[in-house]
Image (cartoon, rainbow, N blue to C red):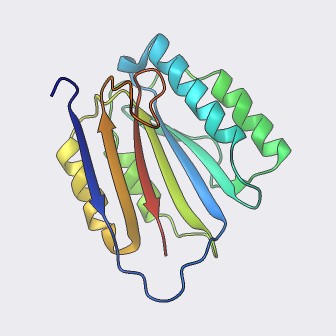
Amino acid sequence: MSNPAVMVSFFPEFKGNMKQVPCEFIFVVDRSGSMSGKYIKEAAETLMLFLKSLPEACSFNIVGFGSRFEKLFPESVPYNQSNLDKAITHTEELKADLGGTRLYSPLEYIFSQPLKTHLTRQVFILTDGSVSNTAQVIELVRKNASKARCVCMYAWWMKDFPLYIGHLTVLYVSLLL
C-alpha cells in the first residue's frame, strides 16, 4: 500500500423519520506552521469552494486552529451575501500563523456548543494531516458518537481521494440530532 489511508466511522441510532433538514456548517481550517506556503493556499481554495457551494437556509462559521483556535464569527451565522462576503475576505487572507497543530481544543469547543434548533451540524476539517494527539482527537469524536454520525477520513497524497484537493486531508464529522 503506497498511499496509507484510515477511515473511522461512528454511527448513532436515530429513531423515526429522517428527512433532509437545513444545516449548520463549521469549517475547521489548520493554520499551523506546517501549512505554510502552498498548503494554506490549497486550504483556502478548498474552503472557498465549500463556501460558494453552501445551500440556502443554512448557517456557517470558520474556525482556524493551531496552538490556539480563532472563530470568524462568535457563533454560526445565517448564509447570506453579507456573511458570505466576510467569509470570502477572511479566506483570501488566510495565513499559517497559529503555531502548532492542536485539533482537540477546537473540536472540544464545537462539540460543547448547543445545536441550533432544527439544524444539522456538519463539521469539515481541512488539514495537512500533521495533527498532534491524534488518539485523543479520535477518542473525543468517539465520546460524542451518541449524538453524532462521524466519518473521519485521513488520506495522504492520494490522487483518487474524492474530496482530495492538492494534497490536503479532509476530515469530515457530521453531527446529527
58 up-or-down from 19: above or below: above
Q: Position of residue 102 (x, y in %)?
A: 32, 37
Q: Foreground residue, 99 or 163?
A: 163
Quadrant assignment for the N terminus: top left
Image location of residue 152, percent across then percent down: 33, 49
Residue for point 41% across, 27% down: 168
Q: Nearer the viewer, residue 18 or 126?
A: 18
Left or right: 112 in relation to 53: left
Q: Nearer the viewer, residue 96 or 122?
A: 122
* Residue at the outermost bottom position: 16
Q: Quadrant of residue 147?
A: bottom left
In the displayed orientation, state which residue is furthest to the top.
37
Residue plotted at (45% across, 18% down):
39
Residue at 73%, 28% (x, y): give it. Answer: 89
Residue name at image x 33 percent, y 31 percent: 101
* Residue 135 left/right relative to 74: left
Residue 161 vs 22, above or below: the answer is above
In the displayed structure, 100 sits above or below 114; it is above
Q: In the rendering, at what x and y percent does residue 27 appear? A: 54, 44
